Amino acid sequence: MTADELIKEFRNRFRREPEGVFFCPGRVNLIGEHIDYNGGSVMPCTISRGTYLAAGRNIDKTFRFQSMGFPATASLHVQSSYTKAGKDWFNYPLGVFHELLQEGHELPGMDLLFDGDLPIGAGLSSSASIEVLTAFAASELMGLNISRKDIALLAKKVENEFIGVSCGIMDQFTVALGQKNKALLLNCDTFVYEYLPFDTGEYQLVIINTNRKRALEESKYNERFAECGLALGALKKELSIKELCDLDIASFELNQELIHDPVLRRRALHVVTENARVGDATVALQTSDWLTFGKLLFASHQSLKELYEVTGKELDTIIDFCKEYKDCCGARMTGAGFGGCAIALVQKISFDDFASKLKLFYKKRTGYDADVFAAASGGAVTRI
């Protein structure tokens, strides 16, 4: 849907003109998986797909939430606070208004119409996109002058405390501060970040959605988090470290026998080697060495499969195909795993052939239909 079409639909639904139209992208994590909670750095970038919002203040002291993609709507009088209402999509923007109210902002009513082209539940940060988009639009229309970093922090608070999901800052931070043709190198603990060049040249960034629901994600995520804590505890008996990522590969190899459980040792080995791959990937991007970057993507996936055990048949099937496709220089799962999406770097001239052959291969192996689409590196949340 174009901005003009969204404005037209806003007029039809609310019988007035919107005050503004806004866009917030989704994101993928290029490399650096499951190390954000171990003191490492992630390397996300925003993508050209995302969420759109037409919005305007009203004089009715009412928040009206509507979406082109979901039938559920809500019309709620402005009050001092809110609580999550079921599992409907409008809890995400409602949580933003709740947090703004808790920060002492006086809010008028607003009419909001959302639309987007991010697949829901695929690990492309559709929820963070909605949250950051709502906060940005409210700040713009109400003159709240909230910085992009503070918008990201507010959106994370919504996710953690209002929605009840124990996520980190990566998703919100990336879509609030991303830049076109740039990747972010972000430490999720310290918020120290830098921009890296991500103009892929002759290669196309491709996103492949497994269309597999990630039912195990939360329980396995918590399990891996706990396993890393146990591995760290074993190492700290002899080593003065704060996080697993404080160790380089050589230091880990010298001290790995401190971790007696072989499962915990594998988890820690993934963390340490993945953190090293992020460092190598940083150099590869700075020198536009796409072949090396691609090899690091493949190596990351292999580690996530064999050492961290968070991939699964669907994601592994995609990477198996990518390894054999001559014009694909690298691919890996992205996100928490157990479904969701994979990313690949494919020669632009071969994209159509890659997509059609991958879909056939994936369907034969898994029984699912994969969605394959080209993605450009996006910017950040903005007013259109």
Image (cartoon, grey):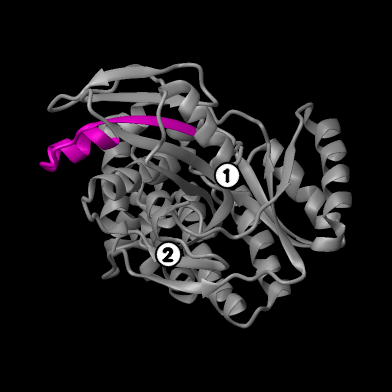
Residue 314 locus on image (x, y percent): 70, 37
Kind of residue at disc 2: Ser
Residue 103 is a magenta residue: yes
Contact? badges 2 and 1 (CB < 8 Å): no
Judging by the rendered image, the residue that carries numbered circle 2 is 41
What's drawn in magenta, residue-wise? 96-114
> Which image quarter: residue 214?
top right
In the shown orientation, is residue 184 left or right of residue 142? right
Depth check, front residue: 111 or 166: 111
Residue 9 locus on image (x, y percent): 52, 28
Q: Distance between the residues labelled 2 and 1?
A: 20 Å
In the shown orientation, is residue 201 left or right of residue 124? right
Residue 196's place in the image compared with 174, above or below, is below
In the shown orientation, is residue 68 left or right of residue 301? left
At 65% from the left and 47% from the top, the residue drawn is 342
Judging by the rendered image, the residue that carries numbered circle 1 is 309
Residue 350's place in the image compared with 314, above or below, is below
At 47% from the left and 29% from the top, the residue drawn is 10
> Which image quarter: residue 14?
top left
Residue 24's place in the image compared with 15, above or below, is below
Tag 1, which secondary structure? loop
